Amino acid sequence: MTSEKASGADNQQERFNFANWLVGFTDGEGCFTISFFTHPKSRLRLKWQVFPEFVITQEEKSHKALKEMQEFFGCGKIYLNKRRDNHHQHLLKFVVRDRDDLLTKIIPFFENYPLRSAKINDFRIFAKILHIMQKGGHLQESGLAKIRILVQKMNTRKYR
């Protein structure tokens, strides 16, 4: 005869869903960012590069979790960020920078499994910017200006 506790534990194991876990992890430790870099020797007329990134940062001891995320998405890289302060663990970052991977893997995932924190606003702006870039908007002054305005609304902790 099986105890109620054992069957309850089995049910918990069956209910574990990696996608939902990943959403929660991203809500707590993830970041959607857009950076701008200038390239004086660039052949582009505007001399600016728009640089989108999806990043999840963890201490080095959580390498396995970041590796599972990388395998789940089938993209991205894990980088070591050595700490020079009083912390004992270096940081690892799971980073997706490839625009095609962001458009075909990261954005669809978070559209199907929405974030539950205020970070969803950053994600929505991030996705909007990537769609502007997909249409070449970042290569025109008007599109670049629109992207700059959108970026100012990201990662501010002031949500409307």
Image (cartoon, grey):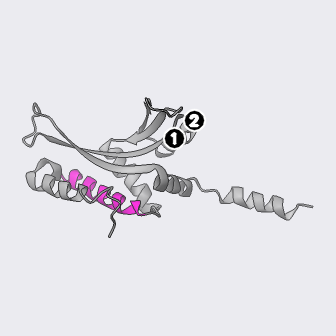
The spot of residue 26 in percent (x, y) is 47, 52
Q: Residues within 10 Å of mark 1 (few under 14, many from 20)?
A: many
The spot of residue 6 in percent (x, y) is 82, 58
Residue drawn at (77%, 62%) of the image:
8
The spot of residue 86 in percent (x, y) is 49, 33
Q: Tell me the kind of residue under disc 1.
A: Leu
Label 1 residue SS: helix
User: Nearer the observer, disc 1 or disc 2?
Assistant: 2
Q: Residues within 10 Å of mark 2 (few under 14, many from 20)?
A: few
The spot of residue 105 in percent (x, y) is 40, 50
Which of the 4 image quadrants contains residue 149?
bottom left
Residue drawn at (18%, 54%) of the image:
148
The majority secondary structure of the magenta stretch comes to helix
As drawn, the label of residue 61 is 2
- Any magenta on residue 159? no
Quadrant in the picture for the N terminus: bottom right
Which of the 4 image quadrants contains residue 131?
bottom left
Label 2 residue SS: helix
Looking at marks 1 and 2 on the same chain, the residue that comes earlier in the sequence is marked by: 2
